[in-house]
Amino acid sequence: MKYCPKCKEIMSLKQIDNQLFYVCDSCGYKEPYDTSNLYVDVVREERVLVLQKDTTAEPTVKVECPKCGNDEAYTWIVQTRSGDEGGTVFYRCTRCKYTWRVYT
Ligand SMILES: [Zn+2]
Ligand SMILES: [Zn+2]
């Protein structure tokens, strides 16, 4: 997690022109992302995203869980704030709670 040096809001990781930036949704400040620790950070941000999510309020769809073969999962879409990039569709298996995602 990284905080904006200007307004102290949490910055989000975004891909702009095939480069990664930390972008502050509040004031628009951005800075290039150091890709040397890319894997660790992306994984950490996804986990935060997933943990914060209360899936029990989400609709379920018929989709096969890649882990246990169950055919029902909660689904939700994470949209970037700019709206011109595609959203990411998340699924969470209703049985084993395995979470995976699909890019749109
Ligand atoms: Zn800011
Ligand atoms: Zn499952």
Image (spheres, grey):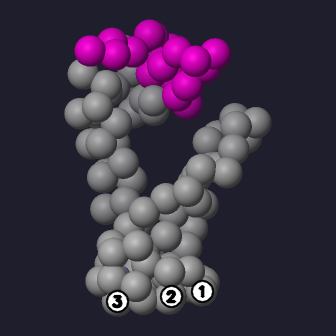
The residue that label 3 is drawn on is 95
The location of residue 71, given as percent across then percent down, is: 50, 88
**Can residue 30 be seen?**
yes
- CA gap, disc 3 and disc 2: 8 Å
Q: Amino acid at mark 3?
A: Arg
Q: Which residue is mark 2?
A: 72
Residue positioned 59% across, 50% down in the render? 103
User: Is the C-beta separation of discs 3 and 2 under 8 Å?
Assistant: yes
- Residue 21: in magenta span: yes
Q: Residue at x 60, y 86 (%)?
A: 62
The image position of residue 35, as x and y in percent, is 34, 16
For image coordinates 24% across by 22% down, the residue present is 37
Counting from the top left corner in percent of width and height, residue 52 is at 35, 61
Look at the image and give the residue range highlighted in magenta: 14-36
How far is mark 3 from mark 1, CA to CA?
Answer: 13 Å
Q: Position of residue 65 (x, y in %)?
A: 43, 78
Q: Which mark is residue 62?
A: 1
Identity, as a three-letter code, of the amino acid under mark 2: Glu
Q: Under 8 Å from ligand 2: the CB of mark 3?
A: yes
